[in-house]
Image (cartoon, rainbow, N blue to C red):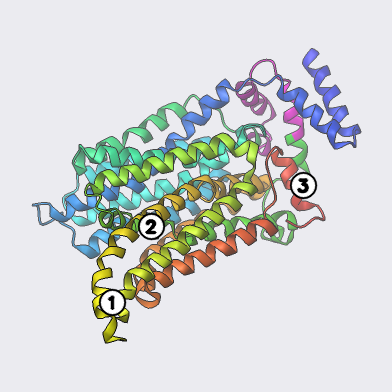
Amino acid sequence: MDIQDERRRLLDAEGGNEDPSGLMSVQDAYLSKVKNRKLYLATFASVLGPMSFGFVLGYSSPAIPELTRIADPRLRLDDNQASWFGSIVTVGAAVGGLLGGWMVERIGRKLSLMFSSLPFVFGFTIIIAAQNVWMLYLGRVLTGLASGVTSLVVPLYISEMAHERVRGTLGTCVQLMVVLGIMGVYLAGLFLDWRWLAICSSIPPTLLLVCMCFMPETPRFLLSQGKRREAEEALRFLRGPDAPVEWECARIEDACDEQGSSFHMSDLKDPGVYKPLVIGIMLMVFQQMTGINAIMFYAENIFEQAHFKESDLASVIVGLVQVVFTGVAALIMDKAGRKALLIISGVAMTISTSTFGVYFYLMSKPHSTTTLNVLMLDIQSKAAEEPHTDLAWLALASMGVFITGFALGWGPIPWLVMSEIFPVKVRGFASAVCVLTNWSMAFVVTKTFQDMMNLLTSAGTFWLFASMCTINVIFTIVFIPETKGKTLEQIEATFRGTSGP
């Protein structure tokens, strides 16, 4: 009865106290009794999914060079096949995003995550046993499908489990584990051939399946299904024995009752639904239009021009920079806030992509202007070699700034904000639309990148990316609300209120 009395006291304080500082003190009183150990354990189990997804994304980098030189003609990839081997993952992931949106509403967050481990394992098994190129493609599509489901389910699972003090840090762990997976597969690729690499890549999803057996479903999903007792048990597991979880349970339940239980298309007229949906979609579009895939595409060439002979090792260094700065973002996310980091990240990427444009422009200039003035021929021929060596370091510095900026903000935060801003009843549908947008844009940018280079030149393409980074900074300042330190229910109330996003 002590817990019940405390819950009633806390709820009375929340209901009767109009002063926001009073409300915060109620939350502080509750959070002071919370123990995070098992919340961290559940987060660790779930982020084995993004690590698996990182292994899938990184796998093509060490595998493609081997598969283009392999002795077996049935498995040997030409340039076009190698391009599809790399990019077909995004097609599977786009479908996986839609499938994940349906699954999280039907069978819940936990079971969706457990089922997503199966196509990971089956996909890598098909790659290991591949006898022809089509088996390689099928394996990549299946692992892509699993990546799409994972990229939707894990951010939702973490945001619905975590409380507001640690939600930013734990949510950023999704991107941290993706880049850790990419770096892990790059490192393993230095020592293992493509088949053993596929065997290694199937270990994280196997661990995911086993570990998630012992983790709870999210309290918000259980309450949306009317399972009050199970929701309290899940909260007790996540918050520790001392926290009066009935208070948090009642708060979530009130929000669920206010919204209604099921999603209808007519709900899209509600500003509490369409505002966060538009923000979520635009975040995903801007994330892909920053030029991250283009920079990664050029990374090897840039290292070679800087006379860095070990391009395999260079890829590991790029991966390490991503891991370090995504880790930094995780540590400061709940202190600095999402909005500030997005702006800093956007400005850093604007500067670096603009510099990249200048680099490519200067690299091409000696060749394009020599015919304009014969008197300049001697000067240019002497100077032509110096820019190539000097400017390579400019490109290297630009790439470092870009990857650092992306890892601090536009890498992890769109996925984190996506998991925070949608009301419970539209979370599956809205997240599916966002994931589909992200992976579709990734496919379009990757496949049209070479055409853009031909049409706009290298310099023009990177200046286009710079202009997109500038627009995303403006978009962030004007439209994206700060979600730091707010409960999911308070974030929903922000969008339902009269103030704009």
Residue 89: quarter of image? bottom left
Judged left or right of residue 176, residue 24 is right
Identify the secondary structure beneath mark 2. helix
Q: Position of residue 71 (x, y in %)?
A: 8, 52
What is the CA distance from the residue labelled 1 to the residue labelled 2? 19 Å
Q: Residue at x 76, y 40 (%)?
A: 255
Q: Residue at x 43, y 56 (%)?
A: 292
Instruction: Determine if the magenta segment contains residue 249.
Output: yes
- Mark 2 or 3, closer to the camera: 2
What are the residue bounds of the magenta stretch? 222-251
Q: Earlier in the sequence, mark 1 or mark 2?
A: 1
Q: Which mark is residue 493?
A: 3
What is the CA distance from the residue labelled 2 to the residue labelled 3? 47 Å
Identity, as a three-letter code, of the amino acid under mark 3: Ala
Residue 236: quarter of image? top right
Q: Please, is residue 300 above or below residue 210 in the view?
A: below
What is the CA distance from the residue labelled 1 to the residue labelled 3? 59 Å
Q: Earlier in the sequence, mark 1 or mark 3?
A: 1
Identify the secondary structure beneath mark 1. helix
Identify the secondary structure beneath mark 3. helix
Q: Which mark is residue 367?
A: 1
Q: Nearer the viewer, residue 308 or 469?
A: 308
Judged left or right of residue 319, residue 36 is right
Name the residue tied to disc 2: 394
Quadrant where the C terminus sits is bottom right
